[in-house]
Amino acid sequence: MEDPEVPTEHLHEHIHEAAHEGHDKWSMYVAISTAFMAAFAAVSSLMAGHQSNEALITQMRASDQWSYYNAKGIKAEVADAVTKINFSKAAADSSQSNAARKEKLKKDQEKIQEKALDFEKESKEHLERDMILARAVTFFQIAISISAISLLAKKKPLWYISLLLFAAGICQFVFGLL
């Protein structure tokens, strides 16, 4: 899975230039807050990518366990078929050994199934965190855009809206870490 892209470099440069041109405090606050937004967006994007990769890896582990589970099941069925085919006295002794082997294979299957289900659960948890962190990235990107618009249009209320979106992104970011 791909990391969410954060195309904010050009906005950050424009805000920085505008802050130096205006030399007023508000422009500087907008520039500084936007830089923080961009930093959080980058970290959130990186962490979302990590969670996505972990989800993929644990899902592959679950698939491996299910394949192993199926192999044990096939072995158990083959052992059962061999027991049914053999009819002689020697086969009776062999059938007891095959029955014990089949029982062991079934017990092994139960352990393997439990492991596979644990991996699937872990994969799901990673995907949930990925979605939360991706949502945080989205909040940060929108906040950066609105912050840039507020500076260009010289509208402080837009900057306050961007700060609220930044706060929402921070909440998502923290929630994604827990």
Image (cartoon, helix red, strand yellow):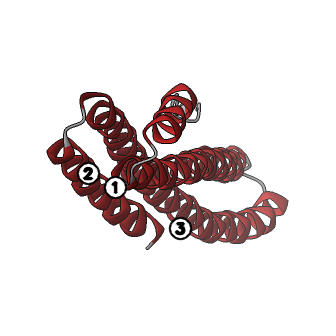
- Answer yes or no: do the residues labelled 3 and 1 have beta carbons within 8 Å? no
Are the residues tagged 2 and 1 within 8 Å (C-beta)? yes
Residue type beneath disc 2: Leu
The residue mark sitting in front, 2 or 1, is 2
Residue behind mark 1: 169
Using residue 150 as the reference point, say whether residue 49 is left or right of it. Answer: right
Q: Residues within 10 Å of mark 2 (few under 14, many from 20)?
A: many
Residue at the image point whose x is 54% and y is 25% from the top? 10
The amino acid on which the numbered mark 3 sits, given as a three-letter code, is Glu
Query: Rounded to the nearest whole Å, what is the CA distance between mark 3 and mark 1?
Result: 36 Å
Judging by the rendered image, the residue that carries numbered circle 2 is: 165
Specify the quadrant that holds the C terminus. bottom left
Q: Is residue 50 left or right of residue 174?
A: right
Tell me if residue 72 comes above or below residue 171 in the rendering.
Answer: above
Gap between marks 2 and 1 measured at Cα: 6 Å
Please, what secondary structure does the residue beneath circle 2 have?
helix
Write the residue at 72% across / 47% down: 82
Image disc number at residue 114: 3
